[in-house]
Each structure stands twice: as C-alpha cells, then as structure tokens.
Image: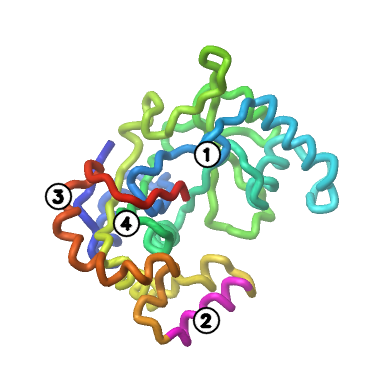
C-alpha cells in the first residue's frame, strides 16, 4: 500500500490528491477516523453474516419496503443499494468521488488517528445492475442508480467465502491485487479542528455533505456554537486539549501505537 506524509492542512491535502490523481482519474476516496479500522463492509464487522442471512434480510426489505423503492421490479443490486443507504447492514462500503467529503468524514468522526483512503479503480471490475452481488469472488464497483440523492457517492461490493463452514470477508487492503491500488493519507490528529474549519471556508460542511434540512440545521447549530471545539463530535471536544500535546509522539508510530478508542465507522 502506498503511504503519504501526514496531512497538516487543506492545501497539503489538495497537493497530495493532485499528485495521486495526476496519472489516473478513476479514483475513489474514503475517510476513516482510525487507522486500525479495516476496509470491511458493515455486514463483516463483529459477527459476520452468511450470504443466506444477507439474502433473507434483503427479502424482508423487498416484501415490506416496496413503498420505499422508487422503481418497479427492482433488481437485487437496486434493493441492496437502497437498503444500504437506509441503514441495513450490507456487503457494500461507502466511497466518494469528492476527496474533500472524505477528508470531512475523517476529521469529523471520533477517532484519534484519522486518514483518507484513495482507491485506484482502474483494474476493479464493475457490477451490472442485473448481476448477482452474492455470487462475486472479488471486490466490484457497484453502479450508482441515476436518481441517487448523493451524486458523489460510490460503492464497493465485497465478496465472501466459506472457511470451515463459516462466512468470511477479506479486508480490501488485504485482498489480492488491491494493495497497490490503495494509498493512505494520514491526517495529523491535533489539526482535525483546523482542517474542519478550513473545509467549512471551502464550502464543505454538514449542509453540503448531507444536502438536506437535517444537514443545514446541524451546520447552523455549529455556526452559533461558542465552544472552541464545536466543529468536532461531542466525545472529542473534551479530549481536544489533550490531543494537542500528543501529536508529535504519535506521528512516529503510525499504525503501530495502540490507542484506547475504537470506532469502525
């Protein structure tokens, strides 16, 4: 996997992304709050569900959620995408074509060692809307339905296998052929607030991310929040001052230092 030096500002992030995408434009981005979170879909976190269980869960959505599906006779892929966006545990993983959205998620979420993953999708196969997502043997790119609310969102669909009768997913960074397709952009943890503020000045905030009244209200709340750590999640505000003094020590131990917090998202 490719590694980039720590990002300490929005301009440094922009320069790194431009350098990475200079030779290839088919890139996806994903922000994560903690480097110890593997690139696994939600259905593979904790107790991994079997394909049969996933199919039964999706069948419930097909039977009882038809009023929420905006097409007649939806395919399995369409059902899976709609259910995933609504919160169902699936084998899909969220990405974005907008690097600044990924940076926002990395800095705005709980976690003391944030980073942005950059995925080169040039050699990753596409899954057709009429294909069976449970039959694949490697990671695919899920097509985005034309009426999707988030135009920047993209999805990877991940394969599972049975090992000694138990379902198992391979983390994307450990999948054969994927190691070279990934680049890590670690973010200096004590500068998360600064980067969030820079992103807001750039027009990337709750309002632009969620693109609805919910996001606008969250953004207005923060506009009138006098707390200096108001741009961070509540559980990080109390740790903000402590993070300032720990950054120099943590920078030399990227992916090697154990930290007490753990967050899959």
Between 164 and 186, the residue placed more toward the observer is 164
As drawn, is 190 to the left or to the right of 54?
left
Q: Residues within 10 Å of mark 2 (few under 14, many from 20)?
A: few
First in sequence: mark 4 vs mark 2:
4
Label 2 element class: helix
User: Which residue is drawn at the image coordinates 58% and 24% (left, top)?
Assistant: 136
Cα–Cα span, label 3 and label 2: 36 Å
- Quarter in which the N terminus is drawn: top left
Cα distance in 3D space between marks 3 and 4: 14 Å
Q: Which residue is mark 4?
A: 112
Q: Earlier in the sequence, mark 4 or mark 1?
A: 1
Asked if labels 1 and 4 touch by Cβ distance under 8 angstroms, the answer is: no
Q: In which image quadrant can residue 190 be found? A: bottom left
- Residue 29 vs residue 51, the one in the foreground: 51
Residue 41 is marked as 1
Q: Residues within 10 Å of mark 3 (few under 14, many from 20)?
A: few
State which tag comes first along the sequence, 1 or 2.
1
Q: CA distance from mark 1 to mark 2?
A: 31 Å
Nearest to N terminus: mark 3 or mark 1 = 1
Q: Which residues are magenta?
A: 214-225
Q: Nearer the viewer, mark 4 or mark 1?
A: 4
Q: What is the secondary structure assignment of the residue under circle 4?
A: loop
Which of the two discs, 3 and 2, labels the residue nearer the N terminus?
A: 2
> Residue 252 got which mark?
3
Prevailing SS of the magenta stretch: helix
Q: Which residue is mark 2?
A: 221
How far is mark 4 from mark 1, CA to CA?
A: 21 Å
Task: Name the mark on residue 189.
Answer: none
């Amino acid at each position: 996997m490719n590694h980039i030096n720590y990002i300490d500002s929005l301009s440094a992030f922009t320069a790194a992304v431009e350098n990475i995408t200079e030779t290839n434009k088919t890139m996806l981005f994903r922000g994560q709050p903690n480097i110890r979170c593997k690139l696994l879909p939600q259905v593979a976190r904790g107790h991994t569900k079997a394909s049969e269980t996933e199919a039964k869960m999706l069948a419930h959505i097909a039977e009882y959620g038809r009023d929420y599906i905006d097409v007649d006779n939806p395919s399995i892929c369409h059902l899976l995408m709609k259910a995933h966006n609504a919160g169902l545990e699936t084998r899909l993983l969220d990405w974005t074509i907008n690097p600044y959205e990924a940076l926002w998620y990395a800095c705005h979420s709980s976690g003391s060692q944030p980073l942005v993953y950059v995925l080169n999708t040039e050699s990753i196969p596409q899954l057709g809307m009429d294909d069976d997502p449970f039959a694949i043997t490697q990671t695919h790119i899920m097509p985005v339905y034309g009426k999707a609310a988030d135009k920047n969102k993209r999805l990877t669909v991940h394969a599972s296998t049975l090992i000694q009768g138990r379902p198992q997913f391979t983390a994307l960074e450990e999948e054969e052929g994927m190691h070279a397709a990934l680049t890590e952009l670690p973010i200096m943890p004590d500068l998360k607030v600064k980067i969030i503020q820079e992103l807001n000045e750039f027009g990337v905030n709750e309002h632009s991310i969620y693109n609805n009244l919910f996001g606008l209200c969250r953004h207005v709340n923060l506009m009138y929040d006098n707390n200096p750590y108001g741009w961070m999640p509540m559980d990080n505000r109390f740790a903000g001052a402590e993070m300032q003094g720990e950054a120099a020590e943590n920078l030399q131990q990227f992916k090697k230092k154990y930290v007490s917090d753990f967050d899959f998202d």
